[in-house]
Image (cartoon, grey):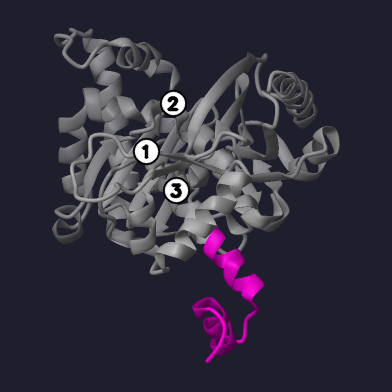
Amino acid sequence: MTGSADDRRAERTGTSTDDVRRHNLSTVLTLVHRHRALSRAELTRRTGLSRSTTKDLVGELTQRGLVAESPALGVSQVGRPSPIVSPGNRALAVAITPEVGAVTVGLVSLGGLVLEEIRFPVDGAPTVSETVAIAAEAIDGIGQGLAEGQIITAVGVAVPGLVHGPGSAVQLAPNLDWHDEEIGQILQAATGLPVHAANDANVGAVAEHLFGRHGNADHLIYVNGGPSGIGAGFVVAGELLGGVAGYAGELGHTYVGGRELCHCGSVGCLETEVTQAPLSRLLAELDTRSPDSPPVSHSGAELDVINRQARSLAIALGNCVNMLNPRLIVLGGFLRVFPAYAAGVLRDELAYRSLRGPRDLVRVVPAMLGSETLMIGAAELAFAPLLADPGEF
């Protein structure tokens, strides 16, 4: 029999060698991107490809500037140590997060490394036109500062609302007062770049799942809290649960009690009971204190507020635990204050609001990526086409 093993595999599966190579390039680049560094030997083991095929694929990705090889350091073994393959810095993505009070624009490289993050304050909620104008000007400025050969491949937008996945269109972002806005098409026309938009909590869930280094994160709920409200993203068996149109995860608009009117038109929603403003000082303290700092005393009023909010949050989380049986609940945005300052109240109330079996299997932890979670998640939207077909870069 003549031909390479890849040729024979292609004949058996009815695909061309081009399809096989495209798939293999995608597999290798995706592994390097998500692990941030792997030896060539480890890539061979994980892909099941031959050493010569892996070397050839890494060589092509290196020529394209998508990965870089470096000698293995500090390795004691017989023979030549396997080179380390890391993400390259030629292909870049822009991440955008509009929220009440600001539009944030970031530059992200493969491997989920945030290179630059600029926050543009606005009065109140930015309109779509304001968001597009700010983003387009920022992207132009970023582009002028790139090194020779660096390319912005696409733009990812994390929106606090209902985003129709396939069309990157916002059906409703109640706190921004966006209704049926074609944010993807409008921003693409303004920048000349491909644009991909999704719900902010969904992209946050993807970021924490892929890059959070939580361990056993294939059944994960990410809950994001920001100035524009609360949302959740569900990772089930390693895959994002998007729903029919990408609208799944609107945990902020589930009923937890209370009579306050929500932007969505309902009353007693989670995001009317758990809000950022009363917790701003605690959040600022959390982000600036060192891990070995002594405990800080807080006023009785502050403790009353965070404990009351923790009980409301636990109602929503208890429903999630009962319905989805997650292993991990990750709290991002301003919700990171609850594990730090109200862990006991949150734990006790969650015990009261959920069944013992699934509750005993779940951990509640703060987001490991901190304030960069949404930046990294939005960039993952932008990188998806490149990871699927690196040969087109």
Label located before the other in sequence (2 or 1):
1
Which three-letter amino acid code belongs to the residue tagged 3?
Answer: Val
Mark in front: 3 vs 2 = 3
Instruction: Label 3, secondary structure: give it.
Output: helix
Q: Amino acid at mark 1?
A: Pro
Q: Is residue 35 left or right of residue 348?
A: right
Q: Which mark is residue 71?
A: 1
Would you name the residue on which mark 3 appears?
A: 32
The answer to whether residue 8 is magenta is yes
Q: Position of residue 137 (x, y in %)?
A: 77, 21
Is 193 situated above or below 48? above
**Residue named by callout 2:** 371
Q: Looking at the picture, which amino acid does disc 2 mark?
A: Ser
Q: Nearer the viewer, mark 2 or mark 1?
A: 1
Residue 370 lies left or right of residue 56; in this view the side is left
* Residue 237, visible in the rendered structure: no
Give the CA separation, mark 1 to mark 3: 16 Å
Dot 3 crowding, Cα within 10 Å, few <14, some 14–19, many 20+: many
Residue 71, image x, y percentages: 37, 38
Mark 2 to mark 1: distance in Å?
A: 33 Å
What is the crowding at mark 2: few (fewer than 14 residues within 10 Å), some, or many (at least 20)? some
SS at badge 2: helix
